[in-house]
Image: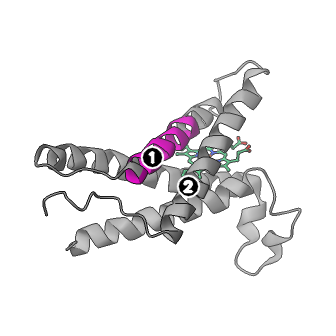
């Protein structure tokens, strides 16, 4: 049985992932070209600078949640709680997306310059980590895969 705080954090995670994926596609940038920005209320998404700021906010929320979850899980693991294999894989792909996103954000800071040939490497790493996380998570949602091993104590 999960409490109200965990339920709220779960929704924060779902919304954070949804916004990160939506704005991630906007970073490619797709929404001006495909008229998503013409949908009432979505004009901001076709403005690259605004879209990337929203992407940062979603990313920051997810990084904060990941740090919180890692601390809580470390405590619960000692008491016997275990993630399922699909839970572990979701964590691994999310961490790769988050870490590579942080590298991308640092690369965008004024004063930081990255060798030109390195740019597509960083871009594609973040893109592929994000896409693997997205498709794998979608599969987990469709198959209703559990995060926590059912043999773990409550
Ligand atoms: C689940 C988490 C995330 C997903 C699904 C995601 C998805 C994406 C996608 C699909 C792109 C487009 C890649 C491309 O242009 O080839 C992108 C770009 C980017 N993401 Fe993320 N991302 C996530 C987390 C983060 C985080 C945590 C940060 C940093 C705070 C971040 C920073 C960036 C930056 C800076 C760009 C590129 C903007 C530019 O072109 O300069 N992302 N993201």
Mark 2–mark 1 CB contact (< 8 Å): yes
How crowded pointer 1 is (Cα within 10 Å; few <14, some 14-19, many 20+) is rated as: some
Outermost residue, front direction? 151
Q: Secondary structure at mark 2?
A: helix
Q: Position of residue 104 (x, y in %)?
A: 62, 35
Magenta extent: 86-101
Q: Position of residue 45 (x, y in %)?
A: 72, 64
Residue 89: give its label. Answer: 1
Quarter of the rendering containing residue 117: top right
Determine the residue positioned at 57% across, 32% down. 103
Outermost residue, top direction? 115
How crowded pointer 2 is (Cα within 10 Å; few <14, some 14-19, many 20+) is rated as: some
Q: Secondary structure at mark 1?
A: helix
Q: Please tell me whether residue 100 belongs to the stretch shown in magenta.
A: yes
- Of mark 2 and mark 1, the one earlier in the sequence is 1
Quarter of the rendering containing residue 108: top right
Q: Position of residue 152 (x, y in %)?
A: 18, 57
Which sits in the foreground, 138 or 104? 138
Residue tagged 2: 136
Q: Position of residue 46 (x, y in %)?
A: 78, 62
Residue 14 shown left or right of residue 33 in the figure:
left
Outermost residue, left direction? 79
Which sits in the foreground, 130 or 77? 77
Residue 130 shown left or right of residue 74 in the figure:
right
Determine the residue positioned at 65% across, 35% down. 125
Which sits in the foreground, 152 or 15? 152
């Amino acid at each position: 049985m999960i409490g109200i705080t965990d339920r709220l954090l779960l929704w924060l995670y779902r919304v954070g992932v949804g916004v990160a994926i939506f704005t991630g596609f906007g970073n490619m940038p797709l929404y001006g070209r495909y008229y998503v920005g013409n949908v009432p209320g979505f004009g901001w998404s076709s403005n690259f600078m605004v879209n990337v700021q929203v992407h940062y906010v979603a990313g920051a929320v997810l990084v904060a949640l990941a740090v919180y979850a890692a601390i809580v899980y470390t405590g619960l693991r000692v008491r016997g709680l275990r993630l399922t294999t699909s839970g572990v894989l979701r964590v691994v792909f999310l961490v790769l997306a988050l870490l590579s996103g942080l590298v991308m954000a640092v690369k965008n800071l004024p004063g930081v310059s990255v060798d030109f040939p390195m740019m597509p490497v960083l871009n594609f790493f973040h893109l592929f980590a994000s896409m693997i996380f997205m498709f794998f998570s979608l599969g987990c949602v469709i198959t209703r895969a559990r995060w926590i091993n059912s043999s773990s104590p409550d």
